[in-house]
């Protein structure tokens, strides 16, 4: 896939929660090629400070307008949050490999599981699945109601949305994994064969993803996961985002039986069974 480096005028950069922003800009070159789960490498200032770009997933596509949803966690995203309408943004993309959502059959029910800012790429995925006529359930987890993202937007897409918060201020009091258990257990308590009707797509913090993997394995549900990792080059050259992948045929370490892949080039989306979760 062709990769573009574009400089575009920011349409809007709006604060949407206590520490998250949604930015939009128009880029026909990227918008017509990007898949859900792919990401952009964004220059956060007009100087070389900070030197490295920041990898941020594509959150939405409306005609040729690209939306990104990002959390302020350091200097780079802090500078990004200061930009306003009319400023210029330098973007490289689309990068990485996205979700294989085209494999969802008409009889399968997609369950999207997002923890915190992990909901960002799942909204774009929901847009594409709705276009295909899928009936989608979206499970969103956050620490408190003030940090729950995208509920209204997902409901406008006619998604079934359920929420959990750690402090019980909205939805159920618990985690998004508790919500997922409630979705899977009733349908599978008597007829395990029904598990095939679900397909899980998930993104969020690693501890949450490990629990999603355990549930998916227990109930034999096909699942794809989008990983969030720190990156330098974004194209697989620096090896800074390497993770361990299960491979029984690996000769690197016979006792461990794993290989390495780069999240930026080989991911960020993987089959959840492919990840060596005990090494994360």
Image (spheres, rainbow, N blue to C red):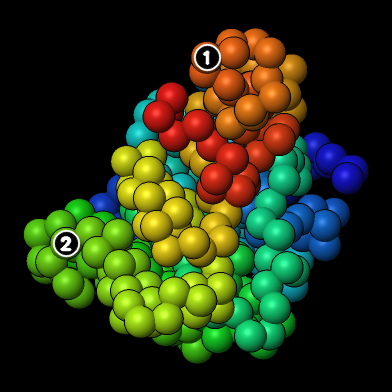
Residue receiving disc 2: 174
**Residue 83 — which label?**
none
Q: Quadrant of residue 25?
A: bottom right
Mark-to-mark CA distance, 1 and 2: 37 Å
Instruction: Give x and y (percent) for residue 137.
Output: 45, 78
Describe residue 113's horizontal placement relative to residue 66 as left or right: left
**Residue 255 — which label?**
1
Q: Quadrant of residue 125?
A: bottom right
Mark 1 vs mark 2: which is more N-terminal?
Answer: 2
Instruction: Give x and y (percent) for residue 230.
Output: 51, 27
Front-most of 187 and 15? 187
Q: Is residue 19 above or below residue 193?
A: above
Instruction: Give x and y (percent) for residue 186.
Output: 31, 81
Q: Is residue 119 visible?
A: no
Describe residue 273's horizontal placement relative to residue 82 as left or right: right
Front-most of 64 and 229? 229
Describe residue 181's horizontal placement relative to residue 230 as left or right: left
Element type where label 2 sits in the image: loop
Instruction: Give x and y (percent) for residue 254.
Output: 59, 13
Q: Nearer the viewer, mark 1 or mark 2?
A: 1
Query: Going 55% across and 78% down the picture, which residue do you hit?
Result: 197
Q: Quadrant of residue 280?
A: top left
Neighbours of disc 2 within 10 Å: few (<14), some (14-19), many (20+): some
Neighbours of disc 1 within 10 Å: few (<14), some (14-19), many (20+): few
Q: Is residue 262 above or below residue 173?
A: above
> What quarter of the picture does the N terminus occupy?
top right
Element type where label 1 sits in the image: loop
Front-most of 7 and 261? 261
Describe residue 137's horizontal placement relative to residue 142 as left or right: right
Q: Is residue 2 visible?
A: yes
Query: Going 55% across and 45% down the picture, which residue do you hit?
Result: 273
Query: Going 71% across and 41% down the picture, which residue do you hit?
Result: 96
């Amino acid at each position: 896939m062709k990769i573009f480096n574009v400089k575009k005028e920011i349409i809007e950069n709006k604060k949407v929660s206590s520490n998250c922003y949604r930015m939009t800009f128009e880029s026909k070159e990227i918008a017509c090629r990007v898949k859900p789960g792919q990401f952009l490498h964004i220059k956060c200032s007009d100087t070389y400070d900070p030197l490295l770009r920041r990898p941020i997933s594509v959150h939405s596509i409306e005609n040729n307008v690209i939306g990104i949803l990002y959390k302020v966690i350091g200097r780079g995203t802090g500078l990004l949050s200061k930009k306003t309408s009319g400023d210029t943004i330098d973007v490289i993309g689309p990068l990485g490999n996205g979700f294989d959502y085209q494999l969802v059959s008409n009889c399968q029910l997609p369950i999207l599981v997002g923890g915190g800012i992990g909901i960002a790429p799942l909204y774009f995925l929901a847009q594409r699945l709705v276009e295909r006529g899928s009936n989608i359930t979206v499970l969103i987890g956050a620490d408190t109601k003030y940090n729950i993202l995208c509920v209204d937007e997902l409901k406008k897409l006619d998604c079934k949305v359920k929420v959990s918060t750690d402090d019980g201020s909205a939805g159920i009091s618990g985690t998004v994994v508790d919500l997922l258990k409630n979705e899977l257990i009733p349908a599978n308590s008597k007829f395990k064969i029904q598990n095939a009707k679900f397909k899980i797509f998930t993104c969020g913090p690693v501890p949450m993803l490990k629990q999603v993997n355990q549930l998916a394995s227990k109930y034999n549900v096909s699942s794809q996961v989008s990983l969030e990792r720190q990156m330098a080059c974004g194209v697989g050259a620096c090896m800074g985002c390497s993770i361990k992948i299960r491979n029984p045929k690996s000769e690197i370490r016979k006792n461990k039986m794993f290989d390495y892949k780069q999240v930026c080039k080989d991911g960020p989306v993987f089959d959840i069974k492919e990840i060596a979760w005990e090494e994360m």
